[in-house]
Image (tube, grey):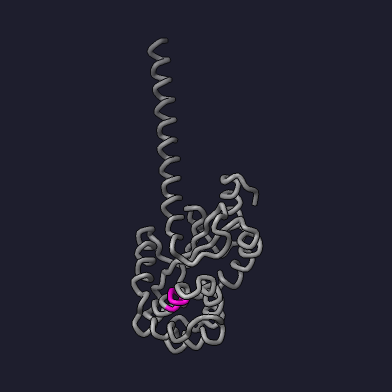
Amino acid sequence: MKMLTMITVGLVVLIVGIFGIAYLAADGQKEEINGLAQGQPVLGDPKAPVTLIEFGDFKCPVCKRFEETVFPLLKKEYIDTGKVKMAFLNMQFIGPDSVTAGIAGESIYHQKPQAFWQFYDAVYRNQQDEYTIWATPEFLVQLAKQQVPGIDVKRLEQDLRTRKYEADVQQDMNNGKKLGINSVPTIYVNGKKVDNPLDYNQLKQALDEALQESGKKG
């Protein structure tokens, strides 16, 4: 009986230890993925308890659908209310002009951080066929001139000509590859991947669960 008790206690300690390690690993992954938002375009209250990260490609038609159908609901219900902050990272792999569009976004972000989100809206509204090269420097400069007020268009033009922020775009993509991302949009909520980001109910469930974990109600 004494031996049985010792074995039982040992098993309990082992199980608790395994769960503890798994919890720490999950918590570490959350911090690591949320940390990718540092130095990126962020929409919402910087102190919001939940971090949503989108990896996207400006030429991707599915990303356009996300921006048109899911993003407005997400913004109204969670971002504008201070519950969630959203960061965008480049996963510009459809074509060489995807990278050019990513460089334009980085240039605008470095000039005027919140203007990035005007560019984000504008580039998807004016998205063309994914199989043609349309996101040229000339197109992007003209788009910014017309729909992203308050930025230095000459500086944007120079940044595109010199490809000043190409390394920043590539770093985002490298981070995406490390996470095994092979499609866009890919969405993480506090470090957890959302299986179908176009399903707003699924995204809402992930956000509400993250808010409950942080002690706030969705």
Which of the two residues, 147 or 60, is positioned nearer the viewer here? 147
By secondary structure, the bulk of the magenta-drawn segment is best described as helix
Q: Quadrant of residue 77?
A: bottom right
Q: Quadrant of residue 3?
A: top left
Q: Residue at x 46, y 69 (%)?
A: 56
Image quadrant in which you'd find residue 81? bottom right
> Residue 79 appears at what percent x and percent y?
61, 61
What residue is drawn where x is 58% and y is 49%?
Answer: 209
Indicate whether 202 appears above or below 57: above
Total number of numbered discs in the rendering: 0
Residue 9: image x %, image y %?
Answer: 42, 20
Question: Height in image: 208 above or below 182?
Answer: above
Please check the rendered image and state whether residue 208 is part of the magenta-colored stretch, yes or no: no
Q: Position of residue 33 (x, y in %)?
A: 43, 55
Q: Residue at x 56, y 69 (%)?
A: 66
Q: In the displayed structure, would residue 67 be above or below residue 36?
A: below
Magenta segment includes 107: yes
Quadrant in which the N terminus appears: top left
Point out residue 207 in the picture as x, y percentages from the top left corner: 58, 54
Q: Which residues are magenta?
A: 104-108
Residue name at image x 48 percent, y 56 percent: 193
* Above or below for 2 versus 49: above
